[in-house]
Image: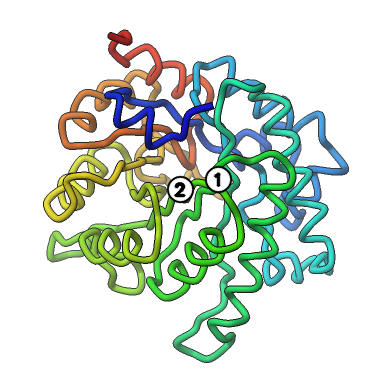
């Protein structure tokens, strides 16, 4: 199978998948549970989510492993099961994807802050190595280091995956619009700063996820393209900005609205488009339908 970046170089716009937490909640996941434990205890539910995104037309699907690092798993007393749970996550997505679609091993932040000396860079490097190696062993052919805010932590993750595995490396940060109209992460990182630092660290594909709906992602892509004309860009947008409805968070963007932004994202310079919080297989099917036929 071709590398993702090679498919992009051939001029293809690729479709990624959508939210996993949203879909697993519909299958009974409750607050306080460990999502990654579902990979071994409720495999059928996880496989159903992966399969739904394949049926929707995604060219790649992620794994149910966003919180699969040792620090996040320690909250549930599962820090010794990093290898097992991540390998299981990748194996499930590979089963659903088959040989013709990419599997992106999802790697999220640890929740530990380097600036507060809660952890060292060496500790983070080893934690990300453990997770990336297990995802590769389970069948992932790329990893998606996603929802990051801190350049130093993301750099550790990218370098760990780059030096210890053969995975293709995707790295995305989460940007919010400030009152001044600037896009920054919670640690103050701009899209331009992210692009330069992550490509230097070894990322093959860069981009943004979560935080914003499609409209704001168009602006984020333009900021990245202003400093980097060549590196492929992946966008996983929320289904609009979250709305609090009583004790429940909802996302207002319909599949049709999401798909309407597809040409604008492509024009801005995005190469891979999918969804994050609140998006469903219906959103991904709409994006796949909006994609121009292959030449």
Q: How far is the residue under mark 1 from the one under mark 2?
A: 6 Å
Residue at coordinates 49% horizontally, 84% vertically from top-left? 114
Which structural element holds mark 1? strand
Quick check: marks 1 and 2 in contact, CB under 8 Å?
A: yes
Residue 264 falls in which quadrant of the image? Answer: top left
Check the image and name the residue furthest to the right: 41
In screen coordinates, is 144 left or right of 78? Answer: left
Dot 1 crowding, Cα within 10 Å, few <14, some 14–19, many 20+: few
The residue under label 1 is: 248
The residue under label 2 is: 244
Q: Quadrant where the C terminus lies?
A: top left
When the figure is inspected, residue 60 is found, relative to residue 119, above or below; the finding is: above
Check the image and name the residue furthest to the bottom: 117
Residue 39 falls in which quadrant of the image? Answer: top right
Residue 25's label in the rendered image is: none
When the figure is inspected, residue 91 is found, relative to residue 75, above or below; the finding is: above
- Percent across and percent down for residue 226 are 11, 51
């Amino acid at each position: 199978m071709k590398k993702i970046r090679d498919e992009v170089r051939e001029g293809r716009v690729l479709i990624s998948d959508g939210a996993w937490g949203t879909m697993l909640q519909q299958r009974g996941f409750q607050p306080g549970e460990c999502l990654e434990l579902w990979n071994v205890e409720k495999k059928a539910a996880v496989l159903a989510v992966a399969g739904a995104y394949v049926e929707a037309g995604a060219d790649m699907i992620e794994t149910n492993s966003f919180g699969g690092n040792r620090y996040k798993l320690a909250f549930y007393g599962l820090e010794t099961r990093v290898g097992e749970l991540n390998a299981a996550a990748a194996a499930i997505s590979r089963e659903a994807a088959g040989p013709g679609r990419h599997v992106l091993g999802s790697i999220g932040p640890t929740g530990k802050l380097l600036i507060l000396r809660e952890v060292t860079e060496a500790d983070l490097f080893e934690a990300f190595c453990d997770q990336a190696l297990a995802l590769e062993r389970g069948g992932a052919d790329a990893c998606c280091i996603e929802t990051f805010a801190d350049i130093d932590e993301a750099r550790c993750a990218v370098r760990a995956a780059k030096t210890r595995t053969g995975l293709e490396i995707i790295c995305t940060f989460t940007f919010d619009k400030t009152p001044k109209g600037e896009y920054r992460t919670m640690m103050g990182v701009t899209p331009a700063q992210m692009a330069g630092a992550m490509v230097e660290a070894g990322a093959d594909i860069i981009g943004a996820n979560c935080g914003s709906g499609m409209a704001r992602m168009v602006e984020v892509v333009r900021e990245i393209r202003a400093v980097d004309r060549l590196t492929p860009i992946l966008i996983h947008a929320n289904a609009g900005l979250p709305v609090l409805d009583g004790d429940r968070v909802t996302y207002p963007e319909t599949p049709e609205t999401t798909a309407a932004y597809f040409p604008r994202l492509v024009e801005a310079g995005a190469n891979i488009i999918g969804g994050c919080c609140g998006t469903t297989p219906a959103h991904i099917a709409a994006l796949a339908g909006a994609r121009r036929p292959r030449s």
